Amino acid sequence: MTDAMTDKPIILVVDDSRLMRVAARKILKNDFEVLEAEDGEIAWEMLQNESRIGLVMSDLSMPNLDGLGLVKQIRQSAEPRISNIPVIIVTGAEDDDGSRESALSAGASDFITKPFDSVQLLARAQTQARQQRTQQALQDSEERKQQLEEQNSLDALTGLANKHAFLEHLEEGLSYAVRHRTELAVLAVQIDRYKVLFLRRGKEAAESAMSQLAKILCADRRREDTVARIGLDTFAILLPCANPVGARRVAEQLRATVESQTFDNAGDTFSITTSIAVSCPLIHPDIKPQELLFDASEKLSSAQHAGGNCVVHKRAATAPASLPADPGSKSAALARQPPPPQVASIAAVQHALEALSMGRQPDGRMTALIRATLPLFEEWNRAQDNRHRALLEQLQTALQGDEAERSAADLATGAAQSLHSR
């Protein structure tokens, strides 16, 4: 193979008709290196073994694996190299509109009808190849930029902390939460369909949207909060001492603000939406910053599958009963800190709930009992469509100081009796 041939984009033509494959090869051979497959199964095997394939043109009706099945397998691939490949579906007169709509829903990039016109076929293939090269160049550029930025602490485009710096802040926040037994939340904010924005409006508009969104995310933040850009289209916000209710409220406010905002790039106005994942971990000494980002990434995937422009959150129902002390090298510093709030044992919680359900005052320190049972009340509130959110917020406030212990006891008694009556 000559050097000139290797510089050409590679297109895989899939058709059970040898005559159609030969016709396509003659039309495309001057601009593409053409590979051929007789059906979808052979094409799928070639895609897995040949990493240079950048475009697929497939007949819709074929034996074994047809064009619709091939598109689905490509889009569902775990390898981005395969799942992002453009696919042009070739339809015949016998293919109804329903078949074409199914292929489009499965992820087909374009359609062309047999018998195809040579000029039209070449133009469609060239358009898809250019878009693929643009996307790949964007991804390569972003990867190189991230490698350079990891050596520093700031994102060059937005001026925010980068992913490396955010992980450092997150590690510090988790360490503080473990020592002081406080809560912590991480929001991951992703622009919906960012690649579409980039392709349709260009790099300048896409980067302008990123910069404007960064300002929105930073507005009204507390001094202790950290806002960072952690990916091509993704930001993260660290909210120390934030509980799940408060974190979700912040996420919903940000989502609504972005949706109502008009973005501008040199007079070109447009709108964007965001998906936001809320991660509120159960704090324990072994928790790692990467675990929170992974959790947020999983939730963002769920948000994208749901159509975007939404907030996804989840909270575990139980918390660890106790936390070990920090290493001995920090014991002197810890000795000067206020003692952590007590946490009741599982047996104490069970006895307390039994006493409350019978109208008796439970034994033991009430603040510790409320702190241990609060996740149970949160799950109950969610099951009641958040009708008792005000009660939970009052409990959170009561737990902030021992001077409010009696108030917390009264609230817990009412909550447990309400649980028993239901």
Image (cartoon, rainbow, N blue to C red):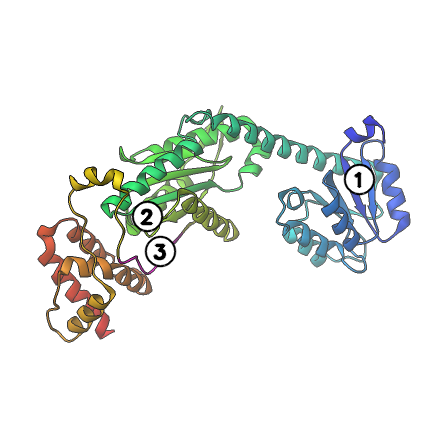
Label 2 neighbour load within 10 Å: few <14, some 14-19, many 20+: some
Q: Of the residues under marks 3 and 2, which one precedes in the sequence? A: 2
What is the three-letter code of the residue carrying label 2? Pro
User: Which SS type dominates the magenta stretch?
Assistant: loop
Label 1 neighbour load within 10 Å: few <14, some 14-19, many 20+: some
Residue labelled with disc 1: 121
Name the residue rendered at 24%, 48% in the picture: 181
Residue 417: % across, % down: 18, 70
Residue 306: % across, % down: 50, 53
Q: What is the CA distance from the residue labelled 1 to the residue labelled 2?
A: 60 Å
Name the residue rendered at 76%, 50% in the picture: 45
Q: Of the residues under marks 1 and 2, which one precedes in the sequence? A: 1
Name above or below for residue 270 compared with residue 422: above
Magenta region = 313-321
Name above or below for residue 416 compared with residue 311: below
The answer to whether residue 90 is seen in the rendering is no
Q: Of the residues under marks 3 and 1, which one precedes in the sequence? A: 1
Total labels drawn: 3
Residue labelled with disc 2: 285
- Helix, strand or loop at mark 1: helix
153 or 252: nearer the eye?
153
Contact? badges 3 and 1 (CB < 8 Å): no
400 or 27: nearer the eye?
400
Residue labelled with disc 3: 315
